[in-house]
Structures are given as C-alpha cells and as structure tokens.
Image (tube, rainbow, N blue to C red):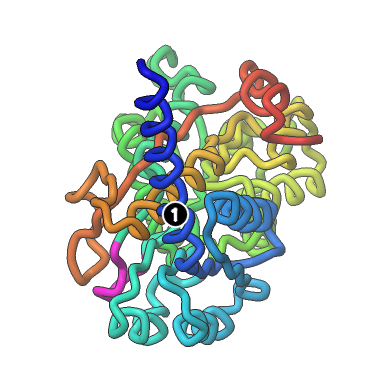
Amino acid sequence: MKTSCKIAVSLMAAALSLSFAQTACAFKVGIAMPTQNEERWMKEGFELRDKLKSAGFDVELFYGGDDDVPIQQRQLPRMVKEGCNALVVASIDGNALTQALEPAQKAGIPVISYDRLIMNTGAVTYYATFDNYKAGVIQGQAIVKALDLDNLPEGEHKTIELFGGSAKDNNSKFFWNGAMEVLKPYFDDGRLIVPSGQTKFEECAIDLWSNDIAQKRMDELLGKAGYKPDGQGDKHLDAIYSSADILSSGIIASLRHAGYTGKTAPVLTGQDATAYAVKSMQEGFQYMTVLKDASVLCDRVVEMAKEIASGKDVEINDTKTYDNGAGFVKTYQCEPVSVDRENMKKLLIDTGKVKL
C-alpha cells in the first residue's frame, strides 16, 4: 500500500474512532441494580459501570438499598430527569416498575432489562439475560446424575425437597420449569418423591431470594419431616433443588444447625457461582452451581449501548421466548455453564472469576 493510502486509511480510522467517542461521551447510561447486599449484584453493578465508562459513556449507577422497591421506583424517573439517554435496569420486583418507567417511555429512552425481565410495560426495549430455562435444565440434570436415578433398582426411590426463586422475579419460573421438565419423569414413576408434599412453585418460592426465608423454610422441613443426617428411608433426605446460591446459603445454615456435615449433606444445587458456593462445594455441602458469567452479560450490554448510541440495529438472538405482558421483548440470551466439584477450579478459581 502506498504511503498516501496508508495515511488516508489511518485518518479515516481515527475519524471513525473519534466519531464514536463523541457519540458515547454525549450518551449517558443509567444503571439500576437491586441491592448491594448480595455478592452477585454488588460485583456486576460496578463491573458494568466500569466497562461502559471504558467504552466512553457517561454512567450513573444506583442500587435499590436492600432490595427496596420504592427506592428503585424513585430512581428510574430521576435518571430520566438527569439526562440519561438509556437505562439498564435489574429489577427488584419485575411487576412494580410500570409507572416508574413511564417517563422513559414518553421520552423515547431505550430501556434494557438486565437479567430479570421487567413485566407489564411497553417501556422495555431490549432484554439481556441468560438462557434461564436451560439453567434450570442443567440443575435438574445434575440431580439426576448425582442420585443415579436412571440406574435405581426397581422399587427403590430417592427423596428431594424443592426451593424456587422469588415469585416477583420472572426468571424464577424459567429456572423452575427447566428443572421440573427434567425431574418430572422420575416424579411420575416414583423414583423421586417429595416427602413434604410441597411440589408446586407457589409453595416452594422464596420471596425476594431471601436466604433467611430459605433457612427458616428448611428448618421447618427438617422438623416436620423428621430428616436427620443418619435418617433411614424417607427420614433420609437425598437431594434439595435450590434455584440459586443465595438460597443454598440459607439451606446450608439450616443443615449445619441440624448436625449435617459435608459428608452427610443432601445433594444441593445452586446458581450464580458465588464464592460462598465454591467454598460450600469444597466442603461437600453443595453439589453444583450454574455459572452465568457476569463478564459475558456486561460485555453484551456494552455492545447494546454502543449500537443504540450509534443508531445501529441492536444484535438480538431471541424474539419468541420472553413475553412481558405487553408483548415479546427483543432479547439476547447468553449461555449458562454447569459447574461442579470436578471443574470448579478450572472454571472459577484459576480464571479469577471467584476469589476465595
């Protein structure tokens, strides 16, 4: 290439770079996260903020107290008033933001629903999440494998109790339905039973993903069903389906108090690949978790923001799964990954995703 051509190409590249930088600097993104009191949200909020800033955006980050819905409801109109050009919202209660998002909708400000789908409003422009149904499928498959349900001798069964996520989080039903699809054949033929009889999502949902509520419910199950570390028959609890690590932490606290150890604990699932979950897997209290890599999701949202700011079409890969009550939302689904005791070092510790 001639020198003059190289100079022209370099100048063009610099101009394009400058053009985006100017667009981004003029573009302000408001982020609303649910709580600073849960490891996952604390880390993701700041990671997303920093990545958006590195891409040239002006960013405001807000947390909704300790999952305080009224605080988040006040924050969203404030972001619009303060000149945000796009909002990224991880809702506390997906059903409680319709009115709070009206100013954004009236102003034509794009709203990216982050991981948790915001319901019953046409204000949501895009949804960035993971394949949440698949996350539940992964959890169900882990239980089948751990209990070796496909090779149970005829007439034998295993016991399980079920913990679903918050009914206020639209994702909870996807996790639950994915896991139950896998486990249903074993419930139907009696290879897997729930001694408490609590098998409906509404009976097993833990409000606001509270580990305290999960612990209290586990205490009640241990007492009513008479489960013991050395229990026999239906007094022996073989597995616990838990939608997320935050619930598993409360369940484990209950098990410890009841005298369980890492060697006698039931097979326990989780999700979010928290440091607590990794420690629990090392100790034998938790069998697996699901990694929904925050870096992957944050990178996707940054790309969405770039595309919005530049006036380009936003890349999506799903238009038929997530109906928020006002219509199907344009979605980008990232892939969840199963993590157990065998691969957690490679996937979480060695990569630095979890620091113990």
Task: Find the magenta span and give its range.
Answer: 118-125
Q: Position of residue 70 (x, y in %)?
A: 55, 85
Q: In which quarter of the image is residue 172?
A: bottom left
Any magenta on residue 356? no
Amino acid marked by disc 1:
Asp
Q: Position of residue 246 (x, y in %)?
A: 64, 51
Q: Mark 1 points at which residue?
A: 115
Front residue of 212 and 344:
344
Q: Which residue is drawn at 41% across and 38% down?
A: 13
Q: Position of residue 120 (x, y in %)?
A: 28, 74
Front residue of 307 and 140:
307
Quadrant placement of the N terminus: top left
Above or below, comparing residue 76 to residue 335 in the picture:
below
Q: Residue at x 55, y 65 (%)?
A: 58
Under circle 1, the secondary element is loop
Q: Where is residue 201 in the image (x, y as percent from the top left)?
A: 40, 57
Front residue of 303 and 41:
303
Q: Which residue is drawn at 52% across and 45% down?
A: 161
Residue 35 as seen in the image, left or right of residue 292: right
Any part of residue 280 in sight: no
Above or below, comparing residue 77 to residue 228 in the picture:
below
Residue 353 as seen in the image, left or right of residue 120: right
Residue 243 as seen in the image, left or right of residue 118: right
Quadrant placement of the C terminus: top right
Any part of residue 261 in sight: yes
Q: Quadrant of residue 35?
A: bottom right
Front residue of 24 and 177:
24
Above or below, comparing residue 263 to residue 126 in the picture:
above
